[in-house]
Amino acid sequence: MQMVQYLSSKRSKTKSLCSAQQADPYHITMATCKSFFTIFLIIFPSFLLKSDARGEIAVYWGQNEQEGTLTKTCNTRRYAYVNIAFLSTFGNGRNPKINLARHCDPDSANGCRRVSNGIKNCQGQGIKVMISIGGGEGSYTLTSDGDATAVANYIWNNFLGGWSNSRPLGDAVLDGVDFNIEQGQGGSPHYAALARRLSAYNNRRAGKRFYLTAAPQCPFPDHLLNGALRTGLFDCVWIQFYNNPSCEYSYRNRGGFRRAWRQWTSSIPARKFFIGLPASRSAAGSGYISPETMRSEVLSFLKGFEGYRGVMLWDRYNDVQSGFSSAIRGSV
């Protein structure tokens, strides 16, 4: 009602201003008033749209065949990002290898190349599809910056814009690389070198930009990814606020959660920050937040930060079981 009165007042003032006759040679003409009003009508709706803008949802896919295909995942139109999990073997002279659970066997004759169609379908809907490296299980580490460069070259040629006759996911060109590094002490300084090398490839393919994302643990700083994150090269950081009682949200730990979020968003130079959550109670040991609590308390806090952009979920299978993304989508 106040907005209607405000607009009515603005119209009446505009009318009197435009209809007044003044001797001053610099008086506002009717044409000028019409121009001002036209500009107002164009700009004002953009403020309304901005205030109603929704956040985005990212999800991990690939670790349970019962979650459905990549095409089915993206056809729900619930997600803005899908992280294919995982490239779980790399570094220290190892032959890099993906592990998509029972979705496909990378060692078979056809491998996982059929996933290429799903990737292209997702991208055709404007969804970014990333290859996620690392994970909680697997065999990976980086022993030197040279090792990091070799891994970056492999990723570029086999998943991004380079060329290889043995691309594990077929000929689809993914949108970037997600760092989900959860093991290994010695290799942590070299993930910064990996990020720099991958970022440098952005200049090698005209017309397509590649993205870097990361999923650090919420205790700050993440001892494995801190160096990489401080390069300022990461577009999205989805912080894992689960399996970490000291900083994850709970009724008794609101303060710890809020302090952690403030520290992450004020200390790491990234474009977008997402709260990472389990999509169901069984998806993680701790850290689950009900959709009701998300809507009534958590999201209202997060939206007060300029860098907040949405929610990351582990994982698609658990989201299918719980319907979590559907329950929060309108509020994110």
Image (spheres, rainbow, N blue to C red):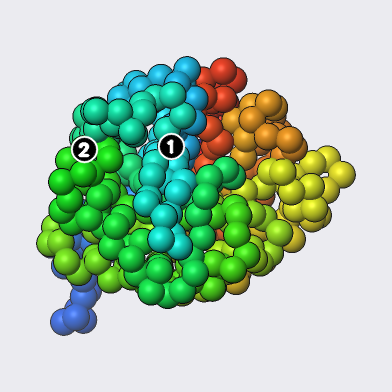
Q: Is residue 16 left or right of residue 183?
A: left
Q: Can residue 182 be spotted in the picture?
A: yes
- Given residues 224 and 251, the one toward you in this image is 224
- Given residues 183 and 161, the one toward you in this image is 183
- Given residues 309 and 88, the one toward you in this image is 88
- Judging by the rendered image, the residue that carries numbered circle 1 is 99
Amino acid type, mark 1: Asn
Q: Is residue 78 left or right of residue 227?
A: left
- In the rendering, at what x and y percent does residue 197 appear? 33, 70
The dot on residue 310 is none
- In the rendering, at what x and y percent does residue 229 appear? 51, 68
Q: Is residue 123 above or below residue 140?
A: above
The earlier-in-sequence mark between 2 and 1 is 1
- In the rendering, at what x and y percent does residue 37 appear? 24, 55
Residue furthest to the right = 252
Identity of the residue drawn at 28% across and 71% down: 200
Mark pair 2, 1: CA separation: 15 Å
Number of other residues with Cα within 10 Å of mark 1, as a class: few under 14, some 14 to 19, many 20 or more: many
- In the rendering, at what x and y percent does residue 96 appear? 37, 50
Please, what secondary structure does the residue beneath circle 1 have?
loop
Q: Can residue 76 be spotted in the picture?
A: no
Amino acid type, mark 2: Gly
Identity of the residue drawn at 28% across and 40% down: 168
Please, what secondary structure does the residue beneath circle 2 have?
loop
- Judging by the rendered image, the residue that carries numbered circle 2 is 170
Identity of the residue drawn at 17% across and 66% down: 204
